[in-house]
Image (cartoon, rainbow, N blue to C red):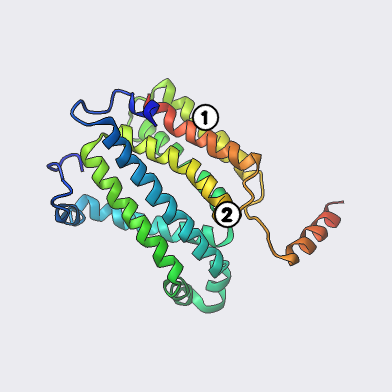
Amino acid sequence: MTIYLSVPPLPPDVNPWIAAAMIASVVLTSTAGEVLTAAAMKSIGDLDLIRARSGLRGAIRTVLTCPLFFAGVFFLALAFFALLFALNHLSLSLVGPAAASLTLVTNAIAGKIFLKENVDRRRWAAALLVCAGVYLPAH
Amino acid sequence: MAAMPPITLAHPGALVAAVFTPWIVLGIALLLGFFASYLTALSWADLTFVLPATAIGYVFIALLSRFWLHEVISLERWAGIALITVGVGVVSQGPSRTEHAVRSEEESAVQEVNTR
């Protein structure tokens, strides 16, 4: 984490540990939100099929009556406010790439552990390539 | 957000008030459209497939800023775009979903027979 914070965009009056805590809270809340939302959508099943069977309203109703979905949205909303809070104190060029690239890695780990997804070499390669691609221009 | 005065944890209400700024309202409307599409994708594909695949958005942002806003794109940024494009290509070559059910084994067996 400290490697990321040694880059110039960190304002001189901000403690690197506080900045790290702000970015970590964005990453952790968004990972929790993504995993819970993905679990909700997996439990619901193919939305295209549900829409074909019971229309757009039926599909919306199915999603809005899933408690797991709201748990996911709660954490995603928390992540959104954590991001707004972090952007208010740190620059976008620091928070954006750091949060986006770290979230890809934490999601790959969380997807494997909690969603039992088959995170094979291909998926790891993709997550790390995108992670590097998002982070590289920040330097 | 950077245009606003600093918000501290002592006044969390300021964060809520920021939500009603016109630019943030427009951003939220567009995010809703994104979220509906994203949820649909998650309903038939793995999170670890959808997340890297949606990163193609970063490439579109860079290309739009280059050819529409005529921004200068640094060499590092082009390299980043190339890495993301390769990453999206890599993940899209694999299966979009992990199958757990017993039925899926039959399906993959059928698929195997069909590909022979």
Same chain for labels 1 and 2? Say yes or no: yes
Q: Position of residue A96 (x, y in %)?
A: 35, 38
Please indicate whether residue B25 sits to the left or right of residue B98 in the image. Answer: left
Q: Tags 1 and 2 in contact by the CB under 8 Å rule? A: no
How crowded pointer 1 is (Cα within 10 Å; few <14, some 14-19, many 20+) is rated as some
Quadrant in which residue B2 is drawn: top left
Disc 2: host chain: B
Please indicate whether residue B39 sits to the left or right of residue B101 in the image. Answer: left
Q: Which residue is mark 2?
A: B46
Query: Compared to B90, does A55 lie above or below?
Result: below
Query: Compared to A50, does B95 lie above or below?
Result: above
Quick one: label 1 or label 2, which is nearer the N terminus? 2
How crowded pointer 2 is (Cα within 10 Å; few <14, some 14-19, many 20+) is rated as many
Q: Which residue is mark 1?
A: B82
- Marks 1/2: CA–CA distance: 24 Å
Q: Position of residue B85 (x, y in %)?
A: 53, 35
Residue at left 39%, top 38%? B61
User: Residue type at mark 1?
Assistant: Ala
Please indicate whether residue A106 sits to the left or right of residue A113 in the image. Answer: left
Q: Secondary structure at mark 2?
A: loop
User: Residue type at mark 2?
Assistant: Asp
Q: Position of residue B114 (x, y in %)?
A: 84, 56
Quadrant in which residue A22 is drawn: top left
Residue at left 41%, top 72%? A64
Can you tell which of label 1 and label 2 is closer to the viewer? 2
Residue B53 visible in the displayed image: no
Query: Compared to A68, does B98 lie above or below?
Result: above
Residue at left 21%, top 31%? A14
